[in-house]
Amino acid sequence: MKTTSVMIAGAMTAAMAGPVAAQTEIEWWHAMGGSLGETVNKIATEFNASQSDYVITPVFKGSYEETLTAGIAAFRAGEQPNILQVFDAGAATVIGAQGATIPVQDLLVDNGIAFDIEDYISGVRYFYADSDGKMIGMPFNSSSPIMYFNVDALEAAGVTAPVTWEEFQDVTAPALVEAGYVPLTQSHMPWIFTENFFSRHNLPFASANNGYDSADVTINMDAPEIRDHFEAFKGWIDNGYAGFYGASWDDNATPFQQGEVGMWLGSSGSFGGLQQTAEFEFSATYLPYWEAITTEPTQTFIGGAALFAMSGQPEEENKATAEFFRFLTSPEVQYMWHQETGYVPITEAAYEVAKADGHYDRFPAAEVGIQQLSLPAGEWTRGYRMGFYVQVRDVMNREYTRYLTGDTSLEDAFATIKEESDELLARFAQTQN
Amino acid sequence: MKRAAFSQPLMPVALLLPQLVIIAVFFYWPAWEAIYSSFFLQDPFGFGSNFVGADNYTRLAKSSEYAKVAGFTVFFTVIVTVLSLGTALLLAVKADKVIRGAKTYRTLLMWVYAIAPPVAGFLGALLFDQNIGPITDLFAFFGYNLQIGLNYNDTAFAMIVVSVWKQIPVNFIFLLSGLQSIPVAVREAALIDNKSGTRRFWDITFPLLAPTAFFLLITNITYALFDTFGVIDIMVKGNPASNPITLVYKVYTDGFRGGDLGGSSAQSVVLMVLVLALTIMQFRMLERRIHYT
């Protein structure tokens, strides 16, 4: 018995060792858990099966923050992976550290793979680019905050999904309360109600061209519009128009999935998961805007994360990374990723494939994210670039929650966010020369 | 007194060396690195680095947020230490008296010891979950809306409950064996002198238990300060926001999560000095009152 299993194990090792020895192996650290992780593994398996020269191994490293931390620690120890997934809030950190990564545009061109930034959908083109427009990180799981709604709830209330926040507070919310629902929850205040609040209304989020031009930057958290928005949000919570369960994503998403909440602001990338968990019919629409601020709302920032090719790897491994990026951006793979997860396809070609296949006829909600990213662009919708931004988000979450639970005043909360964020940005600038 | 001498002078050095190397590698070197980098601001990836003098320290001194976290840390440490030691002592005294089924009883009490802090935190997070937590339902039954992750006090309460629960078994094991090592003769003699059980406990049992209790006091303070990290991390779900956190957790959020290595190094130096002072104080003030047998 024992001998047999040893022999089988030996045979298997020998069988595997044969071809592997001749292949170039690369590693990919990512933050995609649950069903997203399964799709990531599927992409890797398909890439490995599609050719015989390269083998990619995806490694799950925890949350976005944990993955970035692990990548930084590994880089400092000289043990970095070939590909590191870095989320939107970490973009400034990784792009600021020139020399830590190989710009994806250079990587592709140097390895003889055609690259045209115009192939990518407009919303994702420049978020992970430097100030000259050179693409540094390969957009991977790209999403945007959208509004999901419980179709039955809205029908019971006799309303349609609101287009503006004015409509929400005057029409939709009272009707949903009447029908016995908590009208609204949101899952990420810095991302949905701050960053994308600025882009949706085409307002400058930070100085120095939203931070793209220089690390010497200050944040526009003293803009009256954002303050008014949070004052309104607190009003909604206080009179039952909105539920608020803290800064955790899931605590705010769960009541929607349980059918207690009528509308939920989440990620377009939540689509795949919702399809599996929600037991009611749901759909989605654009993130609402304030008509009092603008009558021409603009597109939102791309959220999610990008893949960065870490430097300090042998040539043939970089070649493997480039080949993997070629595979990853192919319309078929992008469409598969889009279908299974809800993240937007990052190239125009993949979007066309999805349309031609009738994906959006079957699931209209799946197109909302990409449509919202394709809305008219504005001067301030390209993205933002701020260092120590993970900490800035922590400060926002802290002060917003304090304000919303009545522990501090609106003025104090925003003054603290502005002051601490600017201090963090100034400190980051000091690390950059 | 005759001095013991080794015939080979190198022998003691060789015997000490492994321990010294371990201390040097795992304590002195990182401690030095922390002190050194606390005077710099550096790029997370390690490219740029700027000397900023004592900036990282003056910033901490001025930060009201840091003061708030420090305040909570003190409160949390005292509460967790007192509650976990107190409860364990009560359980140990009672368990010491149990004759029938003693083993089962003790095993049941020690069980929790095998649970890792993050797992304990995860169990706590589930039990106290706002939407599906049974404990939240229990509180709701009594008319209280428990909101972990949103209400500062509720989160602090849940963190303390889970941290205490996790620590009781360790204390229980030590205190019970401490109790059992008290000679029967001493106890019987005390019984003749005084029939009040409470009185006998404080006059005879407790002083004899003091060496164990002192050791536990130090380990419990260390536990509350450092080892509760896993519990806190899971309970705040990686998103501290306005939730209570301890100084160690702040070192992690600012340094590892936030990438500010200089600022976080300064925080860990402050923490190191605090713990050093605390330990010296404990040994100075308490140890001299304790009689080791």
Image (spheres, rainbow, N blue to C red):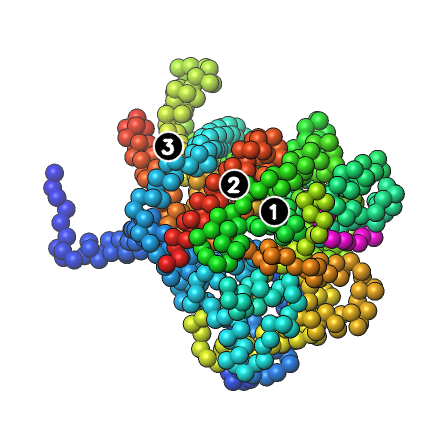
- Quarter of the image for residue A251 reads top right
In this rendering, is residue A81 above or below A422? below
Q: Which residue is mark 3?
A: B214
List x then y, in percent, for residue A242. 72, 38
Q: Residue B246, image x and y in percent?
A: 47, 39
For marks 3 and 1, give the one nearer the viewer.
1
Three-letter amino acid code of the residue under disc 3:
Phe
Identify the residue at horizontal 72%, vertical 45% (top origin): A291
Write down the region rendered in magenta. Answer: A280-289
Which dot marks residue A194?
1
Q: Quadrant of the C terminus of chain A?
A: bottom left
- For marks 2 and 1, the one nearer the N-term is 1
Badge 3 vs badge 1, beta-carbon distance below 8 Å: no
Marks 3 and 1 sit apart, C-alpha to C-alpha, by: 51 Å
What kind of residue is marked 2? Ile
In front of the other: B42 or B164: B42
Task: Provide the secondary structure element on which disc 1 rests.
Answer: helix
Q: Which residue, given by chain and number where applicable, does mark 2 sit on?
A: A417
Neighbour class for label 3 at 10 Å: few (<14), some, many (≥20)?
some
